[in-house]
Structures are given as C-alpha cells and as structure tokens.
Image (cartoon, grey):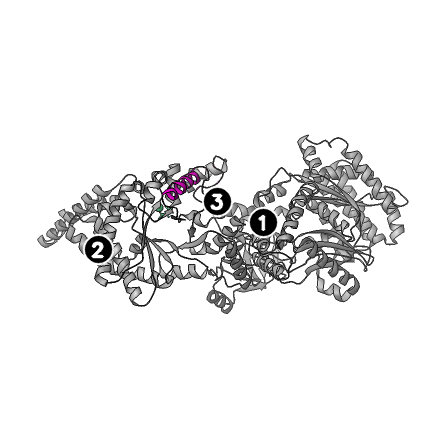
Amino acid sequence: FDEIDAALQYANDDWEKVRGLLGGKGANLGEMTRINIPVPPGFTITTEACIAYLDSSGTFPDRMWEQVQDGLADLEKRLYKKFGDPENPLLISCRSGGKFSMPGMMDTVLNIGLNDQTLARLIAMSRNPRFAYDSFRRLIQMFGNVVMGIDDALFEDIISNKRLQAGVKHDTELDADHWKAVCEKFKTVFSRQSRHPFPEDPMEQLKRSIEAVFKSWNGKRAIDYRNAANIPHNLGTAVTIQAMVFGNIGNDCATGVALTRNGTTGENVIEGDYLVNAQGEDVVAGIRQTQNLKDMSRDMPETYHEFERIAKNLEDHYREMQDVEFTIEKGKLWMLQTRDGKRTAQAAVRIAVEMTMEGMISKKKAVMRVTPEQVDFFLHPQFDPTSLKKAEQDGNKLASGLNVSPGAAVGQVAFDADIAQAWATKENKKVIMVRPETKPDDVHGMLASEGILTSRGGRTSHAALVARQFGKPAVVGVSDILIDMSNRSMTVNDLEIKEGDWISVDGTSGDIYLGKLSTIVPDIKDPWLIKLLSWADQFRHLGVWANADYPGDAKRALDYGAEGIGLCRSEHMFFETERLPHFRKMIMTDFPLERRESLEALLPFQREDFAGLFRVMDGKSVVIRLIDPPLHEFLPDHIQLLKNLSDLKLQIRDAATLKHLDDLLEEIRAKETLLKRVEILRESNPMLGLRGVRLGIVIPELTSMQVRAIFEAACMVIREGGYVKPKIMIPLTSHVNELKQQRQVLEDEAEKVMHEHDIRVDYSFGTMIELPRAALTADQIAEHASFVSFGTNDLTQTTFGISRDDAETGFLVQYMESGILPENPFETIDREGVGRLLQIAMEKGRSVRPDLECGICGEHGGDPQSIHLCHDLKLTYVSCSPFRVPIARLAAAHAAI
Ligand code: PEP
Ligand code: MG
C-alpha cells in the first residue's frame, strides 16, 4: 500500500499541476482520452490564459486566438468536418472548468457554429428538423444569456407560451414547427435586448463565448461559492472546446449523470438520472422529470453495460468515487466528464473504508480522505423520535421527498435566496429555504439556511449536490408541494404555508413536517466511522482526552474514544441549587467557623462527584482542577443589593407594629453587612482577580476540602475494587511560589486522608499554564509539577489582552472581517504569539523534566488546526469537549500522517 500511495502521491503532485492549468474538467477529459475512454475530441485553453485575460481587462494573451484556431483546425481534420462549413459543419461546445469543481457556478455555451446556413445542413443531415431547431434555439438562448446577459426568463416565457399555445405540458411534445417559431422569437428578443442581431459568424460566436466563460470566473455566484468553499479567487477557469455530440436527435439518444457509488449512503452501487432525447443541462436543471439510471439497464441494456464498465474503469483508475456525465448519440456512448463525486459525510466515510477493504487505497489514504468537519457531521442533530412520533400522530407530516443530505433542520420558510440570507444574517432567524429547484444563483441563500427544500429535482440536482457538500440537511423533489411565488406561500395537500411559517425538514428520511420538532444528537454508532476512527488511532501520536465535569459527560467521552479526562472544572459542581448557598456563604463570611461549616456541607457533594468520575473512568487519568471561579459569578449583584436596601429603608416609616419595625431593622443590618462584604470582595477586573490558585492561597481550607473530597472518593472507589488515577491540577499559576505553597497544603491533606483510610492513592500533582509568566518560567514550574496543561482560553485572553467574555461579539468581529486577525484566536490558537509561548513552555518544562506530561484543555483542544500545532509541539494529549473527541482523533491522525 505504501508503494501505491507513493506512486499516487507522485502522480498526484503532477496531476495537481495539470488540474491547475487545464481545470478539473479539461484534465480529466485528457486523461480519459489517454486511457481510451470514448470522449468527443477537443482541446483546452488554460487557466493562465483566463487570468491573463482578466488581468488585462479583456484582451486575449498573445497568440492565444491563433492557438485556438490551430486547435480547431486539428479537430476539423480528425472529424472530417469544418467549423462554419455550410456543407459539413462542425459544432462545438465551449465549457468552463476550474481546478476545483464548482458545479454550475460558471458558464457554458453549447452548439456553437449554428447559423441559418449550417442549420439548414443540420436539418438535412440529421433528417430531424425538430432536433435541429431545438439545438439552434439552445444556442441563441445560451449565447443570449451567458454572453449578452439577457434575462433567461424572457426566453423561458416564450417556450411556456408555445407550450400553452400547442396545448402540451412538456417541451418534448413540441414539434419542429414549434421550435422553428421559437427560434424566430428568440432572435427577436436577442436583437431587441442586445441591440445587435444574433451573430451568424461562427468565429465570432466562439470568440465571444470564450470571453464570457473567462468572465464567468468573476460572476457573483462563482465568487459566493468560492468564499464558502474556501477556493482561492486567483486560479481562473480553463475553457474546453469540444466537438458536440447530441443526446437529442431521437429516441436512441440520451444524456445523463451518474455517481459510481451512492452519494448519500456511500453504498457501492451506481446511481444516477438520465433523459431520453435530451441535452445535458435538461438533467441537471431539474426542469424535466428525470428517469432513474436503473431504467436504462432495461431500455438500453447494451449501452448500459458499456457505461457500467466504463464507470468502474474510471473509479479504478482514479481510485475515487466518480461523478460522470455522458451522452448517447444514436446508440453510441460518449463520456463528457468525470470528476471526484461529491458526497455526504456518511458516504465519504463508508467509501473510504470500503475502498480500503476492496484493496483500492491504503488505510492512511482512507483516513486522510475524511475531514474532521465530516466527522463532526455524525454528531449533528437528528429529530427526537418522540417528537417525530407526535408530529405523525398530530398529522403534521406534510409530505416526503428525496433524502439527499442528512440531518435535521428547523426553520422559517423563505422562498428566495436573498430573503433567506437577510433573515439569517441580519435578523438571526433560523431559515429553511424553499424553492421549486435551486440554481447556482441561490447558493448564498442555501449557505445561510438551516436546511433546503425543493419541489423538483433529483439526487444529482444542484440543490442536492450543494447541500451535501456544505452539510446542509436537504429534501428535494417533493412533488406534493405547490409553490406560489406571487402569494409567497406554498400549499401541501390543501394546507397553506406562508413565508415565515415554521417547518422541520428531515434530510435523513426525506420527510417534512409542519412546526418545530425537537432535535437530539445521535450516538456515533456508524460501523464505518468506528472502523475509520480505529485506523486514525493507529496513526496519531497525540492522546485524546476530554473535558468532563459529570459522570454522564465522562461516559459519553469514553464512548467517543476519550482516553482520559483532561479537565474536570470542579467549580462547576457548585452551581447546583443545593450547593450554591453553601458556596456563597463560604465566600461571603469572614467568620472561620461559618466558613468551616459551609465547607463541611460541600464536602459530601464533591466526594460523590469525584467518586462518580473515578468509577466511570476506571483507572484512566482524571485531571481534577481545583476551584477556579471568577468570584463575580458567585457574588450577589451589587446594584440589586443597594436597591433592596433603599427599599427596606423606605418601608421603615410605614412599619405598622414594633415587631415589624424590629424585623425590618434586622433585615437592613444583615443586608448592610452583606453589602459591606460584597464591596470588599468586588473587583474591577474579576477575570484577573481573586480566582484560581489565588483563592486557594487566600482560603487554604478550600483547597483542603477539595483535596479531602478527592482522596476520600479515591479511597472509597479503591475499596470498592475500582482503579483510580487522580491528577490534581492548580489553576492560574503565575509564579512558582504559588505552586510550592499550595503543594504543601495539598500534600498535607492528602497524607492525612490516606492515613485515615490506610490506603495509598497513586496521584500526581500539576498545574495549568494559562498566563504568559507561567509559560516563560515553565522550567521553574516543572520542578514542582509532574504535569502541565495549557489553559489556552485564559492564555489567549492574557497574551492578547483581549477579554474572552465579550470580545467575540464585539470588536473582534471587525478585526476578523477586515483581516487584522486572520482567525478568531479563541477558536484557533494564534501560532505566532500564543503558540510561541506554548513552545517556550514545552522546551523549558521538558528541559528539567523530560517526561513532563503536557496537555491542552482550552477550547482549542478540539480545533483541528490547533491540534496540528499541538502535534508539532509534541504535546502528550489534547483535551476537548466529549462531542469533539472523534474529530480530535481524526485531526490528530491527519497531523501525524
Ligand atoms: C482555559 O483557560 O483555557 C481553561 C481551560 O480554563 P477555563 O476555561 O476554565 O478558565
Ligand atoms: Mg482558565
């Protein structure tokens, strides 16, 4: 496998260059020709030419046009036809195609070379005037729309009127005379709208089509798509000029698209749609109801088998699932395109695993083929089964369609992309975009929506492809829905749904519901994912631990593959209602006795919490961080207290009885004492105040209580026959002396408890590094700590001097939009600043203690890019929320491969 990978890698590097130059489509057409797959002959103008054209504001680079003419001459020679020749005309297509697939986002013009003269010849040669006129009207329409920018609706209206006039439902029922009349009308629209007659000169048609395709690289929908898919804007599109083959000459002709494996589930079966007697864009546009490819094996068995053989061949050749386009012209099969197929996250995982098992790719390659975002998708919400059942019982199931992109989405109906985008981004609404079908122009709305619903289209329709790529739940082809755009409503079986009403869309089952259903996050039981993650585990060097405070979280983390708990935030345990008053009292009092009583009340709670964690983790590391509450989170509100007090004072005048007055005075005295205490404890910068280790130093009994709880819990679980591995972590250390002092308190208490229980607990002692000073003095710290864990939330806050609590909704947004900061530093570790501190700390720490265990437990521990950095810096493990554990396992493998 390594040899296969090495060969593929070598080929890949060259292949990358070829794709960069010829675009994916051009490169693949060339490659298909090279391996003897029937492809209509053609040539490709490079992306470099496109960039040169766009940079020079609209002039072809030197000699490009001459080279196009040479290419044409070569085509003419090979096909014994001539471009523009009234006797034996060659017709060509002019097709866009960048390095990365951007389905439908750029333009294409077909049937170039047709004019009144060549049309007459096409009629004579094909003996099919209907086909010839249909082809001509397509050229006028595409040229008009793509090159001259004429609104496509003007052309479509003419066709609709023609259908009405002829009393037919479908375009296929229009005959030659109808299309002939349509051509005339199209020409009129063309000249009226563009103030030029339709160009009869084929060379002019070609030249202007190439220019339009070049320009389509910078069209709005292409730019939106690139922004969303992270495709650079400076790559340009290639232009492929190719001889036309026709799927619309008669009933022995067809055109279709297929995926070599199921793009939704990944199952190893070819799936696709095709149309008899039609041209390519009819299938993708979802205008006509397509037929399932299975029907082709019945209706055109021989051609189908050839197609199946070629599809398999292509998949073997590229060692990847392929998305192919084909045309059958009078029984002869032509392949028009192949590219790596888009797929759902589920399909990506299954295909990668099955291809490995089929011997096509290595485990390493399989692991690399799945992205952390795709793994994330497995953890996406699904509808809660009880909510689904209730919706069914209440008759709220509206209809069903094709389940083309899984996941549950709930939102308000928006009938066009602009509204969807505006509601989602400006009004923070959750939106489901509902359209008859989607077009590339709708992409910005699709991206802003929670989910997508269309009344037409198939599995390979635009809506399905785009939704799948961006992980948006989508249901398409729901024919029971009638959308009335003028009323901005839709009806489903007599029920009217207005724009803004709530619906729920189940992309997994294909069902849609009225109202808001509740969602749940599924367990990751997918057998292919489990396998893939087990392969990832073989490659990664980093451990993957989880941040968990409660036994339930710890259990989930273990199920998802966590190898330890890297952070239990022990202060979270005080937030519960029975505990909070004791904790508050403990802070507020300055009477030692009262403080001791509160701590004693808290001890049993903590002991049970820790024992629960130890039991679940069964001997795996459990890092318990001693209390680190910014005190303001626990103090009564100062302003509220002042107000209470003045209210009470006002009541004195109206006190009805002496007893009442005494009670009031008593209450006022208590409130005044409280207020005094709050005023003493109140801090201007609580995040930089009395928290972390400082609190333990000021109130050593607190450290003792927590340590006692940990060790009593450990002894209890050991006595039950369990295994424990507590690691006690001191937060927010800045100076080694803080650590030394706390270590003494901690070890004294630990010894006491172990002595009382006559049990030795194997524990370790460490600290967080979350302040720059700690990072810079990690060598001193490592003398007293057997492990450190980077608290990159606070470390980012204190390195940048940016508040982690409010900056992300404030000025940081502008910082990122304007590019002052490339990324949100609270999401992805800032390599140069915070990352550098990590590096210094690692070097210093391990210089005195080579086996120093180093982890990260800030939110960055679940971010793939940050995980990469942790791998580079040779951390021992990353610790993240249980839901990020599977992602971290894969990301850590990617970093190591
Ligand atoms: C951190 O600062 O990164 C950390 C894990 O601690 P907390 O988020 O609890 O402050
Ligand atoms: Mg912190």
Neighbour class for label 3 at 10 Å: few (<14), some, many (≥20)? few
Is any part of residue 501 visible from this angle? no
Of tags 2 and 1, which is closer to the observer? 2
Q: Which residue is mark 1?
A: 416
Asked if the magenta segment contains residue 832, the reply would be: yes
Magenta stretch, residue numbers? 821-850
Q: Nearer the viewer, residue 173 or 671?
A: 671
Asked if the magenta segment contains residue 28, the reply would be: no
Q: Name the residue: 40% across, 43% down.
A: 842
Residue 626: percent from the left, percent from the top?
30, 51
Q: In the image, is the residue at mark 2 within 8 Å of ligand 1 by its beta carbon?
A: no
Which numbered tag is attached to residue 776? none
Disc 2 is placed on an element classified as helix
For the residues marked 2 and 1, what is the alpha-carbon distance in whole angstroms? 60 Å
Q: Are marks 3 and 2 in contact (CB under 8 Å)?
A: no
Q: Which residue is mark 2?
A: 599
Q: In the image, is the residue at mark 3 within 8 Å of ligand 1 by its beta carbon?
A: no
Q: Quadrant of residue 322?
A: bottom right
Q: Amino acid at mark 2?
A: Leu
Q: Amino acid at mark 1?
A: Asp
Q: Name the residue: 27% across, 58% down.
A: 711
Q: Are marks 1 and 3 in contact (CB under 8 Å)?
A: no
Residue 299: percent from the left, percent from the top?
77, 65
Which numbered tag is attached to residue 872? 3
For the residues marked 1 and 3, what is the alpha-carbon distance in whole angstroms? 46 Å
